[in-house]
Image (cartoon, coloured by chain):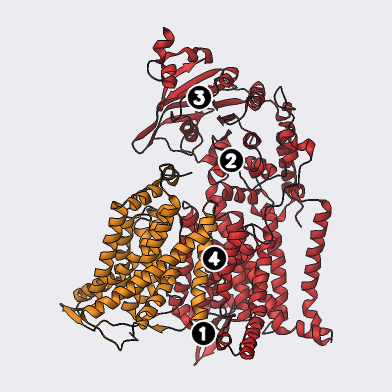
Amino acid sequence: MSTTTAGAIAAPSQAGGKRKAAIIVGLLILLLVFPALSLTGVPFLQGLASQANVDVIATTISYALLATGLNIVVGFAGLLDLGYAAFFAIGAYLYGVFTAFQVMPHWSGFWEPLQMLGLVQKMSIGGADVVHFTLSFWLAIPLSALVAALFGVLFGFPTLRLQGDYLAIVTLGFGEIVPIVFLNADPITNGAAGLNGIQAPSLFGYSFGVNSVPYYYVAVVLIVILTFVSIRLRDSRVGRAWMAIREDEIGASAMGVNLVNFKLLAFASGAAIAGIAGTFYIAKLQTATPDMFNFNVSAMILVMVVLGGMGSVWGAIAGATVLSVLQFWFLQDLTNWIHELGTATGIGFLNKLDLVQSIDLIFGVILVVMMMYRREGLIPAVRRSPNLNFDAQHAVVHRGGFIGVERLGRYTVEQGNALEVSDVTVRFGGLVALNKVNLVVPSGGVVAVIGPNGSGKSTLFNVITGLVQAESGSIRFRGEEILGLAPHKVLEKGVARTFQNIRIFPNLTVLENVLIGEHARLSTGPVGAILRPPGTRAEEKRAVEWAKDIIALFGNRLAPRTAQTVSGLSYANRRRVEIARALASRPKILLLDEPTAGMNPNETLELAEQIKDLKSLGLTILLIEHKLDVVTRLADNVVVLDHGEKIAEGPADEVRRNEEVLRAYLGRGAGVSHAA
Amino acid sequence: MTGFDLFVQQTINGLTLGAMYSLLALGFTMVYGILELINFAHFSVFMVGTFVAMGALQSMGIMGQSVILTGLPLVGVLLVALAATMTVCGCIGMGIERFFLRRLRSVKGPAQMITTIGISYILSNSVLLFIGGQGFNFPNPIPMLKYHIGGAVMDVRQPLIWAISAVLMIGLTYFVQSTKLGKAMRATAQDPEAARMMGVDVDRVVLTAFFLGSAMAGAAAVVFGLYYNYTNFYIGFDAGLRAFTAAVLGGIGNVPGAMLGGLLIGIIETMTSQFISTNWAEVVIFSILILVLVFRPAGLLGRVAPNKS
């Protein structure tokens, strides 16, 4: 099982983890010895481990593979894919086309090297020499993963800009198109009749043929590997980035997650697993028709993921298992019982019911019931937060700034300005949100932006951090143009921000939220996440230490709640998490958008002192704030915006007396009455 | 037939098919306009409608293609079938909203949409289980009259279908544009919260949208049955997906857009079948869906929705 620090912290207890490991090992041993029961000589056990049952379990595992893959796309990254069977089909047809007796070009010298590699055979049909493809199953598995992943990127690309529902529809469209293409590509796929005589895999000269046992063991090996891969991905920088996208796309990109790359990576990973499942499934079945990959299959896999719990690795497997048991064993028995009941009671209607045929009805019921009553699934992905004891719950109000702020280290104050905003104009349709705004933030300084609601303050932050495009102007950070960069690029340069309406990731823990802040400063990719070489382990360990250091700055406000999901935190604590997350990204400038909004006077004072601490360490800060006492206390310089224009600038006291500022805040005539 | 005759013929056929898609697309668009929800249950409400219409016609003694009516009796029978189907479908739609979706309205994420997929499965597979999986001969009391337009042929059912669709769509447009409830509906689509504060009963508006949208699906079901003389438990998926494409093409949430999109998709389907191949019609339609969503998500008539985040 997973042993990341993040996982270990979240685990309820060491004993619970051990019990879980014991269950998994036990199940695995059971799976491994199951076919051997047929050798025991005990009639009951022999019946249990019949070829038919072994085959059904192998099929069940192929569904579990699909569910594991879809769970990465839907559960981790939150991309609702309704056409997942397309990738299953691609993996299936890749192996099918290159092993069945369907595509048989004329033999020529070109094929000889391939013949030596064992990829083709020379056959003679009606006196003519033709090519018969004999792609090895073991080669086809990685190949179909690769090809399906490529199609995953191809299909994923146009959907990147779409959100939620639209994404579902486009993937549904692709899911419809792919089987139709296979249906219509008659010369290659044999159309509706499908491919027949697909080659059975063989190992060391032993052909699997129609014996279920070797397929069973291949399935077990595949599911073990892919579950491992799935867990390793989940508990890594990659998995955190996916979950950040799922929870809040804008927040994720502002914290340095490259949306395009990570969404495509999710699509590709899910597709690769479906491709593998397709090759395996078809090698076992030795026949493939287009209708094996229609919408119903995509929907079934989705039902499995939903039933098990979206985002839960074990849930996906459990969902696949439950539905397969229902489908392959229980429904047949149930139908027989109902028929017997019909015969016994003389109700002819009961005799006609065939529940096996109506498995889809049960799928529908499961979807509705789960959504209405248990959206987190059978095995929820979100672990229950441990309860806090009284001491932990009791807020210790702390004066005098951060606790142990020196842990952050000193920020180097450079010569000149950290941020220079020049003549920036932003327009939304006909509305001018910012009109030729100029602003400088000297390195190591604190500048506050004030102004009435709707004056363009948050738009200013959005345009600096790349969330909004400017019509004209320039934004230079440490002398470098950052206007036009994607949000994650802006963060990489060292510009971190918080949001006025808090954009933390609600279903993730405090620690995970802060770790996502470090995303841009870490380098683990999918391969590192899966293999977890020493370098990756060390990086992850350092990342968690840094995150905990930052969490500890807030004293007992956050430290006891490290493993709690942030959705359950108080408003002020959620603001603190967002600030901690921004600090975790090791910013060179921090943009705080109304950090004290909604806080009571005590909490406001506490935060103001903490911001002052950051200032004393030399961190450059740009602040939007309504509370003028906070502004006066912190800011070296104040910029006033009104209707998208800068109307005043200067030290806080000066700005306070500025007539135009008073007019903007209090209305026309206010300045005059003040003067009088 | 000459190439031009074929073109005229497929335009006639396409407009007929398109009229049906328009009716069906209206349901998607009305619900999406208000709740931003893709209602997959709509597929199956339409399918159930064909069975309701079939039952209504059969209960009036019209079996298969053997009973042919003319004049007032024909009009009466069709009106009764339409009214019955639209009412039943409308009520199913309301039930789906009232008992399932309303409880999930405040839930973020895909829960509502997944629920509609589930309901769609339940409806279609209940028909499979309790009525049967075979194809059914849909009764048709309309006489076989054909008009020749150049080399093309028009069946009397085609102008009849246009007339039914036109009347319903004009009625719906009038309702949405000119009645108090229609105005409340448009207000809710703009901003549910503001509408609620202005005294709009949002629950009632949503329920009405489901009723009207589903009733239109019922009308589409009658049209489908009369035109194809056939139904089975899975017709909802293909027709529904095309109608959804129509709604997206016209600009989802936009009532005239759904009508325009439906007609376009109908014509695209018949033209592709005629001039390329029936096998590729679906691929062409879904490719249009994907292209529109990627390059012009607002559709032909829709405006770009403000970013709600």
Q: Measuring from the top left, give residue A434's x and y in whole percent.
A: 41, 30
| Residue A306 vertical placement versus A204 (above, below) | above
Q: Which residue is mark 2?
A: A255
**Is the residue at mark 3 from the same chain as the one at mark 4?**
yes
As shown in the figure, which amino acid type bears the numbered disc 2? Met
**Residue shown at 71% from the left, 22% from the top:** A400
Q: Residue furthest left?
A: B150
Q: Which mark is residue A449?
A: 3
Q: Nearer the viewer, mark 2 or mark 3?
A: 3
Q: Earlier in the sequence, mark 4 or mark 1?
A: 4
**Residue shown at 26% from the left, 60% from the top:** B170
In this structure image, what is the colour of chain A? red
Q: Nearer the viewer, mark 1 or mark 3?
A: 3
Q: Which residue is mark 4?
A: A84
| Closest to the observer, B49 or A176 | B49
Q: Earlier in the sequence, mark 1 or mark 3?
A: 1
Q: Secondary structure at mark 3?
A: strand
Q: Which residue is mark 1?
A: A130
Residue A81 in sight:
no
Q: Secondary structure at mark 2?
A: loop
Chain corresponding to orange in the figure: B
**Is the residue at mark 4 from the same chain as the one at mark 2?**
yes
Q: CA distance from mark 1 to mark 3?
A: 77 Å
Q: Earlier in the sequence, mark 4 or mark 2?
A: 4
Q: Nearer the viewer, mark 3 or mark 4?
A: 3
